[in-house]
Image (cartoon, helix red, strand yellow):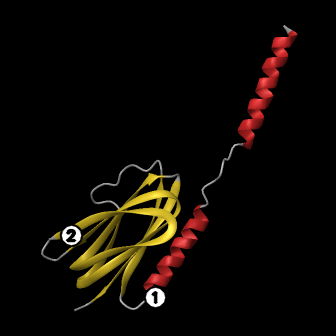
Amino acid sequence: MHQSLRSVVLIAVLATGLFSCASTAETDWQSMQDDADGFVNAATAEDGSLGAATQRLTAQDPPPADDGGITLNFPSEVSIDGAVATCFGDGTAQLEYSVTSEEGSVVSGSVDIVCDGGETEIPLAERGDAVRFSAVLVSGTGAVVAAAVSGGAE
């Protein structure tokens, strides 16, 4: 009986030690947001910038609604040359984008972005009065996605 009790106690102590040593890394939201804000500030300071935005993602987020995400609206139709997106955190995000024009036409697509701070170019040669971005975390625990649009008035 004493042998069984000692075995149970030993197993419990070892299990507690193992679980306490396991990584319980917290998501560093402030650091990720600071990196994304730095990207946005640099991108919007460039000639031809039409705007930029960030979106925070967690693994628990539901898929975005059709009208969800972030929309950059312009007072009139502009020439949209492209966009650059990046992701800070861990895992991979899928970024959907769409450009709408005054006539109501829509150009859309999506790109997968590895959340390592690298930049992903999105070539767009469109005219439009709004650009919408909507992201979802495909893998990982948390990330902040940033996207910047460039172009100009014609």
Specify the amino acid type for callout 2.
Val
Left or right, 6 with reference to 99 = right
Percent x, y of residue 94: 38, 59
Q: Quadrant of residue 110?
A: bottom left
Which residue is tagged 1?
A: 45
Q: Is the residue 152 above or below the residue 19 in the image?
A: below
Q: Residues within 10 Å of mark 1 (few under 14, many from 20)?
A: few
Percent x, y of residue 130: 26, 75
Percent x, y of residue 56: 47, 61
Circle 1: element type: loop
Residue nearest the observer in this picture, 122 or 150 = 122
Q: Earlier in the sequence, mark 2 or mark 1?
A: 1
Q: Is the residue 154 above or below the residue 11 in the image?
A: below
Q: Residue furthest top?
A: 1
Quarter of the rendering occupied by the N terminus: top right
Residue in the picture at 74% in, 37% down: 18
Q: Quadrant of residue 4?
A: top right
Which residue is tagged 2?
A: 107
Residue in the picture at 29% in, 82% down: 81
Which label sits in the foreground, 2 or 1?
2
CA distance for labels 2 and 1: 26 Å
Quarter of the rendering occupied by the C terminus: bottom left
Residue in the picture at 24% in, 66% down: 108
Total numbered labels: 2
Residue nearest the observer in this picture, 28 or 117 = 117
Specify the amino acid type for callout 1.
Ala
Percent x, y of residue 72: 33, 74
Residue nearest the observer in this picture, 41 or 23 = 23
Circle 2: element type: strand
